[in-house]
Image (spheres, rainbow, N blue to C red):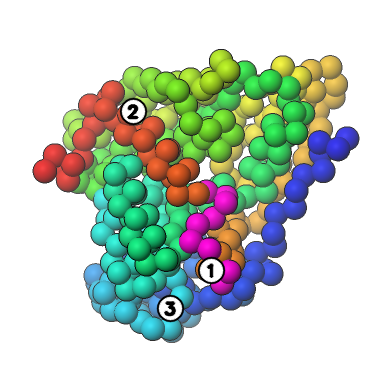
Amino acid sequence: MSEFAIPATPDPAEAPAINWGIIAPGHIANRFTREVHQYTKSRILAVGSRDLTRAQAFASEYGIERAYGSYIQLVSDPDIDAIYVANPHSEHHASAMLALDAGKPVLVEKAFAMNAAQAEEMFAHAVAGNLFACEAMWSRFLPHYTATRHLIETGALGQISGVHADHTQSLNLDPERRMMNASLAGGALLDLGIYPLSFFHYLLGTPVDVHAEGVLTTTGVDLREAITLHFSQGRYAQSLVDMSARGTNAATITGTEARVDIPGWFYRPQDVTFTPLNGDPVTLKTAVEGGFQFQAAEAARCIKDGHTQSSAISWADTVEVLRITDAIRAQLGVAYPQERK
């Protein structure tokens, strides 16, 4: 069937090589470094931290040539082609603006910013410098996401009635940890909820209505929320987001002619199952090793080709998703201290 001729995802190993600098050598930076080195021609040239010892330890572990004890030193390195921003959400705006001011393209971890206003300012800065900027929503670059949207766009599912995707994890809820800290933009929404919300936007576009109910922690961040998005043509998307308990984290896209199922951890590399209304399930082999290499390779291609944004996740995409998170937080009564000033 022609609808299963899924567009090929560009091979990250074929992308041009660039030199990356990393802001903040934390957990997510470890994975980015491993997979860039393993699956692409690019290299992490330098890492920067406010703690030089920490930067040096990270550099030593991954064979990185340069370690800096400040972000300004990192972004000032003339041999760095792009900056990967990997610190907490609360710091993304300041770090990205610092890099853009230094003339460096940026790939900024999701959630791209604390709110849509910050993202708009960051992108305006990229426009002023004619620089590439992109949200590192790694899932949107993966083959199974491409396959899923292709099935919708070709009409293989018929009319879409709904999408369901949960993201629930049992995380450390120590009040002293980042996830519980409002000053670091903690809570379930920006860490976990950003995945289903970006997925819904990727498949269905911008909702016409947002509704959320949830529970807050004693520290003022969101512990969990149930989210319903209403789209045009009577389509709905629903998600449970929770950082206190773990479910299956699967996703289902339901149409009048067929259904697509993505098994547990829907946002990670997976095979997907296409089930026609009156037919047998078909498994589409879309799983891959790693995953972060796809976003890094796309950034390298865009930078080398002189593009300022990626078609996989445009600036408008990022801002529109953050407007959804803004609306959800407003309904839940979650505001970060920086926003109250």
Label whose residue precedes the other's in the sequence (3 or 2): 3
Q: Using the rendered image of the protein, determine whether residue 206 is visible from the camera's viewpoint.
A: yes
**x and y percentages locating residue 139 in the rendered image:** 56, 47
Q: Residue at x 30, y 52 (%)?
A: 121
The span from disc 3 to disc 1 (Cα, nearest Å) is: 16 Å
The span from disc 3 to disc 2 (Cα, nearest Å) is: 38 Å
Q: Is the magenta stretch mostly helix, strand or loop?
A: loop
Q: Which residue is drawn at 49% across and 77% down?
A: 19
Q: Mark 3 points at which residue?
A: 80
Mark 2: few, some, or many residues within 10 Å (few <14, many ≥20)?
many
Q: Residue at x 28, y 23 (%)?
A: 331
| Label at residue 306 | 1
Q: The residue under label 3 is which amino acid type?
A: Ile
Q: The residue under label 1 is which amino acid type?
A: Gly
Q: In which quarter of the image is the C terminus?
A: top left
Q: Mark 2 points at which residue?
A: 328
